[in-house]
Amino acid sequence: MTTAAFSLEQQLLTLALAAYAGAASPSQSAAPITAALASLGPLEGHWQLAWGPAFHRPRFALLDDSVMFVARYERSHRYAVVIRGTNPVSAPDWILGDLWAAHDRPWATGAAGERVSLSSSLGLCVLQHLRAEPADDARGFTSAILKALAGDALAPLSGAARATITGLRDAAQ
């Protein structure tokens, strides 16, 4: 079967599966994910890494507990942000990521009174701080986005946020 024979939903579900490639290995490498993108049937090598993967491993753990990457469908502007949930073989991820779901806290970015589980809050914080080098083809995409942020597009931002984005945009040019 070709990738076209699979629905977009099937391809996205397979991308989610690819995020688990290498989960049982202490090596934080793009190789297992790249291999999964090339070999899993619904993807058939038509999806490539555009950014990442970025990993998070607590200091006391042997395995990563979070991974995120961006995949790009060949010859298109279709991107998928792929975030792996619980690492099924990481005990710290089970303890900190899953067993804290029964406890909640105020949601910092939600409306007044909205709450989020401690595990979701921790997971979101980890994802917001993941960093990775973009793949070569994503550098142009990132530059295009930053260059589009010109003039009035930055007006609603605070001075510090505007200065940061302006600096990033100018560095990309």
Image (tube, rainbow, N blue to C red):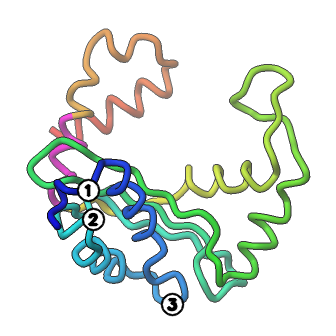
Does 141 lie within the magenta span?
yes
Q: Main secondary structure of the magenta part?
A: helix
Numbered label attached to residue 6? 1
> Does the CB distance between marks 3 and 2 fall below 8 Å?
no
How packed is label 2: few (under 14 Cα within 10 Å), some, or many (20 or more)? many
Q: Nearer the viewer, residue 128 or 87?
A: 87
Q: Is residue 125 left or right of residue 43?
A: right
| Residue located beneath label 2 in the image | 42
Which element carries disc 1, helix, strand or loop?
A: loop
Q: Nearer the viewer, residue 66 or 20?
A: 20
- Please name the amino acid that badge 2 sits on: Pro
> Does the CB distance between marks 2 and 1 fall below 8 Å?
yes
- From the top left corner, tell me how far across and down residue 7 is, in percent: 29, 50
Q: Is residue 79 above or below residue 33?
A: above
Q: Label 2, label 1: how many angstroms apart (C-alpha)?
A: 6 Å
Quarter of the rendering containing residue 63: bottom right
How packed is label 1: few (under 14 Cα within 10 Å), some, or many (20 or more)? some
| First along the sequence among labels 3 and 1 | 1
Q: Residue furthest right?
A: 103
Q: The N terminus appears in which quarter of the rendering? A: bottom left
- From the top left corner, tell me how far across and down residue 110 is, in percent: 72, 27
Q: Nearer the viewer, residue 129 or 172?
A: 129
User: Which stretch is magenta?
Assistant: 136-144
Residue for point 37% across, 62% down: 15
| First along the sequence among labels 3 and 2 | 3
- From the top left corner, tell me how far across and down residue 142 is, in percent: 25, 43
- Please name the amino acid that badge 3 sits on: Ser
- From the top left corner, tell me how far across and down residue 89 is, in percent: 65, 84
Numbered label attached to residue 21? none
Which element carries disc 2, helix, strand or loop?
A: loop
